Image: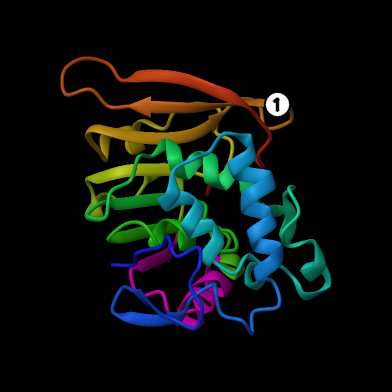
Amino acid sequence: MAKAYLPKAALILFSVGVGFLLVAGSDDDPFLGDRREMVRRQIEARGIKDQKVLGALLHVPRHRFVATELLQLAYQDSPLPIGYGQTISQPYIVALMTGLLEVKPEHRILEVGTGSGYQAAILAELVKEVYSIEIIPALGESAQKRLSELGYQNITTRIGDGYFGWPEKAPFDGIIVTAAATDIPPPLLEQLKPTGHMVIPVGNPDQTQLLKLVTKNPDGPPTVRTVENVRFVPLRRSS
């Protein structure tokens, strides 16, 4: 299991699953300064103080998840296109949604919408297993290749309709949906463990949506809290 918070590390082997990566503190990382500024100005300054989450954002090389022509924009506080009408979310939103899940090292998390693979990589720094579903084959395949090249061995991906979740791997300690749904998908709620959290943008895909934190109660209906306004691409369906 990766121990992500290494703000002063340099040239240290970083455990990820059963593999190892060179930690973000390596002196030969030309984007390290950009990543430090991203964490300090865009995330920590906006109220996110969870050191584990900040450490994951510091470690994961966001520039590896964007197109070459957008490399110099990798650490700015905005979403970026990744093709097929999809985007990589802005760093602050990734940090916010990750923190809302209240993850623990032993957790198993489901992600709906693999996209570039960046959110899955952030989660993989913090939990035991990440299961990620992408409906667009080209994106899912490229994300899987990228994550494998970066050494992540605790992320499993698949191509499919994320609205229905991944029932054979359920239940999950947390679920994160990275595209706007018009409702809270019942199959996802069913696959969430009691007291588990789901973070999902809900609303009209052509308008501002509401980021919802859904907590499954052992008895009775789930608790749903609105966190803030967001803009996500729509959750695609297979039909």
State the residue at coordinates (35%, 30%). Answer: 186
Residue 131 point in image, percent of width and height:
36, 58
Find the residue positioned furthest to the top.
220
Q: Amino acid at mark 1?
A: Thr
Confirm whether residue 106 shows in the render: yes
Residue 163 point in image, percent of width and height:
44, 42
Q: Which residue is mark 1?
A: 208
Find the residue positioned furthest to the left.
219
Find the residue positioned furthest to the front.
8
The quarter in which the C terminus is drawn is top right
The answer to which of 65 and 26 lies nearer the viewer is 26
State the residue at coordinates (36%, 57%). Answer: 126
Q: Secondary structure at mark 1?
A: loop
Specify start and end residues of the magenta stretch as a single range: 140-159
The answer to which of 134 and 105 lies nearer the viewer is 105
- Residue 171 is one of the magenta-drawn residues: no
Tell me where residue 231 sits by quadrant.
top right
Give above or below for 224 relative to 92.
above
